[in-house]
Image (tube, rainbow, N blue to C red):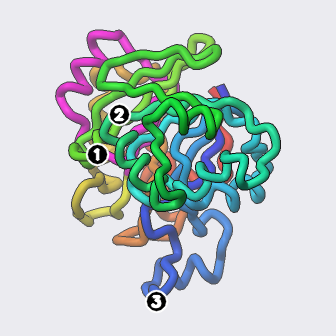
Amino acid sequence: MKITFLGTAAATACPLVFCRCPVCASAWKTGGRDFRRRSSALVGEDLLIDLGPDLMSSAFTFGADVSKIRFLLQTHSHSDHFDAGHLITRLPDYATVDPLPMTICASPETLRHMSDALSLEEPGADLLSKDWQDRLRLSVRPLRHGETIQLGNRRVTAVVSNHDPLDGSLLYVVEEAGRAFFYATDTMRLTERAWSLFKARGFAFDAVAIDATYGPGTRGGGHLSVDQAAEEIARMRAEGVLKENARAFVTHISHEGMPPHATLDRYARARGLEAAWDGMILEI
């Protein structure tokens, strides 16, 4: 399984547009792995996790042919993860030539909020209606916690997140050819429902990407810090949810309390994780 991290930043990206803090100043100067777009990931060539606002910049920079996307796993509908303007271009009105049929998977709440955002781009648009799905050349698959769906040669299982319950936020397990990848952003501490699901299904992950919005010793709302992410990964190892040689990565990284990438990576590695970066390719 090939995973490309198209973006590894939190909602504000990094550096922030108007920020003059040391982290952002360093990112403007050094670029490279310190420059982060909003979080998104591509599995293989055809499965996208989150249709975010930086998708086209990332695709161009990292050579990802997004015209091949056939499946979209949407974690939630917040604007840093879902850009309705991208989706609306599938309409014939935009002269998009022969878009591949696409399946969108998300919670019912997320799908409803995505539809609301779509209607702001195109009055009357309704992602939940068969007519509009036909016009957009897509199908919609609502998912709840614990549900598994077959997408091509992959199995995808939805896992509850406590990031925004009103939006029905989800995390995803992607399985392919005996390998398993757990994408866990955005979230706070994993719920006991999630841990129970891991045990009931006998999941053993080859790789995990976990939310680490805040830096060492920093706390905020709705997300994990890098220290809390390390504690979640340590529990996964202790409970056998990770395979022996599994790799764990922090992603969804903000400027709040964060050092530059190289320092963050050293800090994370001392705690059993690594720091992902934009354009990183993971083969498992």
Image coordinates of residue 21 in percent, x first then y, are 43, 85
Q: Quadrant of the N terminus?
A: top right
Looking at the picture, tell me which residue is in the foreground, 225 or 63: 63
Give the residue pinned by disc 3.
Answer: 20
Dot 2 crowding, Cα within 10 Å, few <14, some 14–19, many 20+: many
Q: Earlier in the sequence, mark 3 or mark 2?
A: 3
Q: Label 2 sits on what residue type?
A: Ser
User: Whole-percent x and y of residue 264?
Assistant: 47, 60
* Residue ID for mark 1: 167
Question: Could you say where residue 125 lies in the image, as x and y percent from the top left?
Answer: 49, 49
Q: Earlier in the sequence, mark 1 or mark 3?
A: 3
Which quadrant holds the C terminus?
top right
> Residue at point 48% right, 21% down?
156
Check disc 1: other Cα within 10 Å, few if <14, some if 14-19, many if 20+: many
In front here: 267 or 6? 6
> Considering only vertical position in the picture, is 133 above or below 218?
above
> CA separation, marks 3 and 2?
38 Å
Instruction: Give the Cα separation between the discs numbered 2 and 1.
Output: 8 Å
Q: Amino acid at mark 3?
A: Arg
Image quadrant in which you'd find residue 61: bottom right
C-alpha gap between disc 1 and disc 3: 32 Å
Residue denoted by label 2: 107
Going by the numbered disc 1, the residue's amino acid type is Asp
Give the residue displayed 26% in from the left and 64% down from the top.
Answer: 217
Residue 241 location (% of width, % of height): 36, 21
- Report if residue 35 lies within the magenta region: no
Can residue 43 be seen?
no
Residue 273, visible in the rendered structure: yes
Which span of residues is magenta-colored? 182-211
Dot placed on the residue nearer the N-terminal end, 2 or 1:
2
